[in-house]
Image (tube, grey):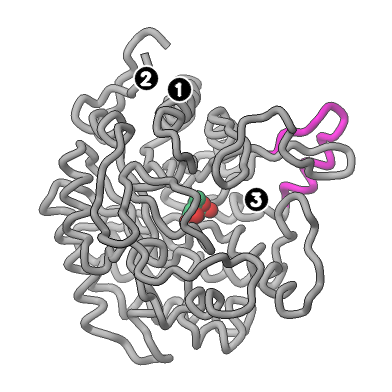
Amino acid sequence: MTDARRLPDDFLWGTSTAAHQIEGNNTNSDWWFFEHQENPYVKEPSGDACDSYHRWPEDMDLLAELGFTDYRFSIEWARIEPAPGEFSNAAIAHYRRMVEGALARGLRPMVTLHHFTTPRWFLERGGWAAAGSDELFARYLTAAEPVYATDVAHVCTINEPNMVASMATAYESVISGRPLPTTGLPAPDRATTDALIRAHHRATETVKSLAPHVKAGWSVANLVCRALPGAEDVAAAYRRPRVDVFLEAARGDDWLGVQSYTRTLIGPDGPLPVPEDAERTLTGWEYYPDALGYALRHSAATAPGVPLIVTENGLATADDARRIDYTAGALEALADAMDDGIDVRGYYHWSALDNYEWGRYAPTFGLIAVDRETFVRTPKPSAAWLGEAGRTRVLPTTA
Ligand code: FCB
């Protein structure tokens, strides 16, 4: 890439986090419960995480100083509604302070209403698949209205509903002892899929009736499925329940969140393991920056006319130079997609901080390192490299 590519002035330029992964001691959530069960997916519990429940001002100070203009974070249902129908005014006030704290520092907040975790009581009554889950979600959002009712432009209803539906299958396999396929993502649970789509539509209506200015959308994990020659139909059939039904459910929304990390190769018999000679990241995923371009193009084709926002993109690595290289490649693919007329409105890097990666701390996705004992934050070179574009409005490159 030779010519500098300018970002549109109103392009969202931020980082993403999720409450459970950074706050610490989210003891009333379903995930905290999973972390303390026999569970093959969990190596260690989340514990104090990054202590961001207390240290969020420091996190936001750093992000603003680095140059970012936007911050996507989630609010925690398990704290806001610790028991069915019992709401915590203190938790609601806490998240409202975060919204105001972001704005005061020049960070426009994007608020995610559900990022993988629910209250434990919600799990105990059957999770998303149980009747009435959409109504309970809407009740929580109604109570949480003071958090997002003013000065919040973007609300993400549900993060990666497709992963939530696959996790429901995985959880069922832990309980029943039924084995899961060794490659690829478990098939999403059908009842959970339907419930999440219902919950998203209901949440969108609820949020917009309470705060009409809010632009609502959801973020889908865009598993980039690359078919080997002759396996196109197999790839399409694999992708449909895992991705496409969730993208289709975003038709007519204000925006659609694109989350992309890697690709899955699909052969005639289905998903294949990562090729032996491929570079792998700390999650074991293939290092594949071009995934973002495919994800954007596929999202635009499946939900035509809906503006796209990259709400997550990044990689887990101990080598920060690889993070810069990967991100530069992904941003180049993003710029190419925009040049081809794809309507992309923003980019949020996953993640602001090294955090709890759903079962373990080893995969470090952060632009900012966090000492696991003292919680001291140390920005990595990639943080300054990426943040600077918030000031210059010029897409960063490695050159
Ligand atoms: C996504 C999740 C996010 C994080 C990244 C690596 O699936 O939304 O919380 O775990 O992957």
Nearer the observer, disc 2 or disc 3? 2
The residue stretch that appears in magenta: 225-240
Residue at the (27%, 68%) spot, across then down: 53
Viewer-side residue, 79 vs 355: 355
The answer to whether residue 230 is magenta is: yes
Residue at the (50%, 88%) spot, across then down: 121
Is disc 2 surrounded by few (<14), some (14 to 19) or many (20+) residues within 10 Å?
Answer: some
Is disc 1 surrounded by few (<14), some (14 to 19) or many (20+) residues within 10 Å?
Answer: many
Q: Tell whether circle 3 marks a residue whose Cβ is less than 8 angstroms from ligand 1.
A: no
Counting residues from the start of the chain, the first of labels 1 and 3 encountered is 3
Going by the numbered disc 1, the residue's amino acid type is Glu
Position of 393 compared to 356: left or right?
A: left
Going by the numbered disc 2, the residue's amino acid type is Thr
The answer to whether residue 264 is magenta is: no
Residue at the (62%, 42%) spot, across then down: 285
Residue marked by disc 3: 243
Position of residue 90 measured from the top left corner of the image (x, y, whole percent): 21, 82
Going by the numbered disc 3, the residue's amino acid type is Val
Which quadrant holds the C terminus?
Answer: top left
Residue marked by disc 1: 332
Nearer the observer, disc 1 or disc 3? 1
Position of 42 compared to 150: left or right?
A: right
Report the disc number at residue 397.
Answer: 2
Nearer the observer, disc 1 or disc 2? 2
Q: Tell whether circle 2 marks a residue whose Cβ is less than 8 angstroms from ligand 1.
A: no
Position of residue 108 measured from the top left corner of the image (x, y, whole percent): 23, 49
Q: Do the residues labelled 1 and 2 touch (CB within 8 Å)?
A: yes
**SS of the residue at dot 3?**
helix
Return the residue found at the far top.
Answer: 2
